[in-house]
Image: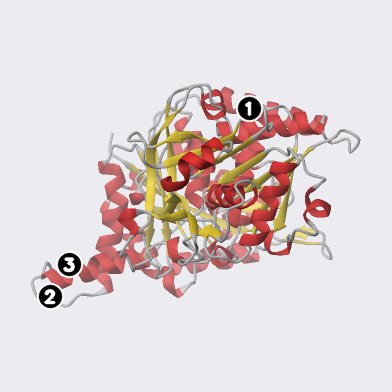
Amino acid sequence: MSTKYVFVTGGVVSGLGKGITAASLGRLLKNRGYKVANQKFDPYINVDPGTMSPYEHGEVFVTDDGAETDLDLGHYERFTDENLTKNSSITTGRIYQRVIEKERRGDYLGKTVQVIPHITNEIKEKVYSLGKDGADVVITEIGGTVGDIESLPFLEAIRQVGIENNPEDVVYIHVTLLPYITGSNELKSKPTQHSVKELQSLGIKPDVLVCRTELPITENIRNKIALFCNVRPENVIANMTASNLYEVPLMLEKEGLATSICKHLKLEKIEPKNEEWEKMIEHFKNVDKKYKDEKVKKVKIAIVGKYIKLEDSYISVIESLYHAGFANHVKVKIDLVDSEKITKENAKDTLSGYNGIVVPGGFGNRGIEGKIETIKYARENKIPFLGICLGMQMAVVEFAKNVLKLEDVNSAEFDETTKNPVIHIMEEQKGIDKKGGTMRLGAYPCLLKEESLAYKLYGKKEISERHRHRYEYNNDYREILEKSGLKVSGTSPDGLLVEIVEIDQKEHPYFIAGQFHPELKSRPNKPAPLFVGLVDAAKKHRG
């Protein structure tokens, strides 16, 4: 079978759920036995989102092979349970960088380098590369909204893909908005019509329309959209807002999205095996139903960070907590708490109502003191605690400062002249001045000590987790920290890089921190062990 290509575009407004649509379709096709590869094209000129502020773009999702990518790749992985690669996240900056490198080498043999064909050829190569890697169906989401100037080269490239391949090998999905106007008491189709017209003007005829709506689409509206947008009524798919994100694949299955795509691509009619996903959703609903009663206590978890103004900054952490909640048959209530506002004086008032605390990753010294006070409060008051990346480093700083009573203790990231740099820069990071893509990135193995909490949680000696950091635990302080009770329970295979620290459960019910990002590998049906352990401990703390 030749590789099939599905392109997902969006119109009218941003935030309609192109990524969730692409991820859901990936899951539905996988449940039909097809090998699926998801991909995201982002029109910004940054080479990757690694240097972008979380306020600007949300979290940076890191793949196993060390690519810093758009957060939509997190949705793709969580929905399809497939590990993606650097070829799954492509930006305008990356495309232009590649073309300019080729031009400098003389690869174009003196020709004038232009958007068409050189930029568009490079984009197409990124599409085709996933097919060459063995995917039956490549699902490519185009970031931005149709009509944006910066998206035009990508749209032109996917138009060309449609010309270069057989009609049955390419399908275009357009995600659009059906707003509900309360005054007229009806859904309005004009925004969808105008968006489709804009797409058609670029030479792309959408085969399927996925309409984001708050109300069911009536037959009258469906037929109207089909008539004016030149699609069949059965290819006008309603995408209603779901109570749970993971319900969307089943909602779209019911609406006939996957059936329609398979028909367009002339794929073998295979009965979908959705039973496992249906069972998972039913379990989620039962947990939600149980905790609808406000009298039933929920587990309250605080995420203490400095990027709280944009929830997407911690989207994988949030989803991981939900996954762990469902695994523990408990509803998790999450609050984002500003670490900048936490002081020694108000830590108790701010944090005493929580059953568990997460201190996530981040960069820069803003909010650091608040994180240290948070960790101190969690440690001294036996509140279940999970530190991630910078959260782990600050746990080491806090312990050295308040238990060992070391003077002038800090991370070298924040104070290069500190007397006691319990966290210092990694050897291979010394001398690096470029910020983009130069950190320790991607999946690395970790060996766990038997009889440790980490080993108990993972259930095996060797694990693999994803990293994104420049600084590390300073081994010069390892002996004194361990003797005082902050145990090293996970290291790199050579024993040099400290990956996990913890306090013995005889001293604290749950205090563990990892240099890596466990949230990046959490799945709704395969929750991350460190989060499962945290929620379990939080449930016991709640009583």
**Residue 506 in the image, given as x and y percentages of width and height:** 67, 26
Q: Where, by quadrant of the figure, is residue 163 drawn?
A: bottom left
For the residues labelled 3 and 2, the Cα–Cα distance comes to 12 Å
Q: Where, by quadrant of the figure, is residue 367 drawn?
A: bottom right
Q: Earlier in the sequence, mark 3 or mark 2?
A: 3
**Residue 17 in the image, given as x and y percentages of width and height:** 58, 53
Rendered image: mark on residue 166: none
Q: Please name the residue that numbered disc 3 is placed on.
A: 102
In screen coordinates, is 356 left or right of 254? Answer: right
Q: Which residue is rendered at x = 73% and y = 31% of the image? A: 285
Circle 1 SS class: helix
- What type is the residue that disc 3 sits on? Lys
Q: Residues within 10 Å of mark 3 (few under 14, many from 20)?
A: some
In screen coordinates, is 499 left or right of 334? Answer: left
Rendered image: mark on residue 280: 1
- What type is the residue that disc 2 sits on? Lys
Nearer to me, 137 or 409: 409
For the residues labelled 1 and 2, the Cα–Cα distance comes to 56 Å
**Residue 361 in the image, given as x and y percentages of width and height:** 55, 53
In the image as oriented, which residue stretches furthest toward the right? 295
Q: Please name the residue that numbered disc 2 is placed on.
A: 111
In the image as oriented, which residue stretches furthest toward the bottom? 112
Circle 2 SS class: loop
Quarter of the image that includes the N terminus: top left
In screen coordinates, is 136 left or right of 109? Answer: right
Q: Which residue is rendered at x = 55% and y = 34% of the image? A: 528
Circle 3 SS class: helix
Q: Name above or below for residue 291 compared with residue 417.
A: above
Quarter of the image that includes the C terminus: top right
